[in-house]
Amino acid sequence: MEIPRNSLLDWPHQVPAAALHCLADTDFLLALELGPPDWWQAWQEKRLEDMLQWLKLPTFSHLPIQRRQDYRAQFEATSPRVPPEHGRLVTFQSSGSSGVPVRFWRSELATRVNVSHYWADHRRQERNLHASMAVITGTPGPHDGSHMELVADNWLHPAVQLGRYSPQFTMQEHAKWVCDHAPHYLVTTPATLSSIISLIEIHRLSAPRVWQVLTSSHTVEPALRDRARRVFGASIRDRYSCEEIGPIAFQCPYSDDYYHVAVANAMVEVVDHHGQAQQPGVAGNVLVTGLHQWATPALRYDLGDIAALHPHCPACGSTVPTLSNLLGRKFFLLKSPTGGLRHVRVLAEHWLGCADVREHRIVQTGAQSFRVEIVLNHKLKESERHALNGMLLRLIGSEFSFEIVQVDAVPWPQGTKRHEFVGCQE
């Protein structure tokens, strides 16, 4: 680690305890991952045993699958209780991307472990934390001006960090802002990244050279990775997480296809529709257990995601469990008439090539039918309807039908997340 120049005079007496704790946690997490597999296995077994004893629950193998509705009911019906060493409890909530918003308690210990995992990933991905970083998400909150300067830590991340509240600006404004500020690292969602790239290409903006794009919240498709490399010269480094548990898996530094499970924070299972473990490499439903989330326990928690699980990483040989074919939420996948699931993304240039579409949403209403909601500044022309229908048939599939409906505004659900494609509503 390179010590920031303006902190040299403070060492050793004025080093913040929180920074030292974070560095120690980071070293432990990486040692656990890089050591022999029996290290993390023994550690997980001990943490799980301690948690189940505290919660007075049966053995792990006898626990039922926990659905999102069960998790919400648990919060409403029970009072949180954790050992004193877990620290103070704070309530959080998820945005309810699956349609079922939840609230939960999280301890200071769980928060500390979550944060340390992201610092460990900076080390794993060899990021230079003296380089600039721009963040475009829904978490900084509304602010004055084009962005807010995030609080830096001279000991951990001394570089300039600019935060921008995603819903506060148009995608075109985001694209211009990224080009103007030219960050070395860009943090955002795959959907926002896709729109920014499209608008840079459409308006022929001068794209900056970006070292890495850090993504989360949605599935990253191979085509988006190719576009990020072409436009920014950047690799995408994705993180798989959920609000209730925190980090679940991090993309392998050597592969776009595999994600190393965060074994110091979560246990991951992949099961079939009957709750039985899938064979290695076979896709199924993802169940997650949070090892530090004792206040509102997530035990064999069904995220509604699809992925395949491997006993180790086929790309780099890491001995921690590894996920592949990470499709994400079933709710946001297209379901074909034969039952297969796949992601769909219609890019800005596809819409704008047919009509001056301001907003759009595609909702699967049946096995072979979709409702397509669009916002225009003028009444939809028949030629535009025909062009949109042809484009959707080409990109989504000729076996489907599309009801194209012009609306004054897309009825987005409450919250900051807007999903432009909603499918597989079961």
Image: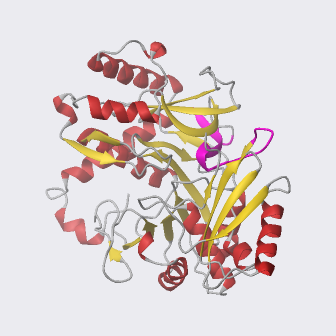
Image x and y of residue 421, in percent: 63, 58
Q: How many marks?
A: 0
Against 102, is 69 above or below?
A: above
Residue at left 18%, top 38%? 87
In this rendered view, identify the residue nearer to me: 160 or 282: 282
Judged left or right of residue 350, residue 271 is left
- Residue 349 higher or lower than 399, as above or below: below
Q: Is residue 197 above or below residue 218?
A: below
Measured as percent of width and height from the top left, residue 259 is found at 59, 43
Q: Is residue 131 left or right of residue 8?
A: right
User: Which residue is painted at 34% across and 48% down in the image?
Assistant: 93
Left or right position of 224 against 187: right
Look at the image and tell me whether residue 223 can be seen: yes
Q: Is residue 335 magenta?
A: yes
Residue 96 in the image, given as x and y percentages of width and height: 44, 48
Residue 225 is drawn in which quadrant? bottom right
Res. 391 image quadrant: bottom right
Judged left or right of residue 323, residue 8 is left
**Magenta stretch holds residue 406:** no
Q: Nearer the viewer, residue 347 or 402?
A: 402
Q: Is residue 133 visible?
A: no
User: In terms of depth relative to the viewer, which is nearer, 269 or 113?
Assistant: 269
Spot occupied by residue 65 in the image (x, y as percentages of width and height): 49, 24
- Extent of the magenta region: 315-340
* Residue at 66% from the left image edge and 24% from the top image edge: 278
Name, please, the residue furthest toward the right.
398
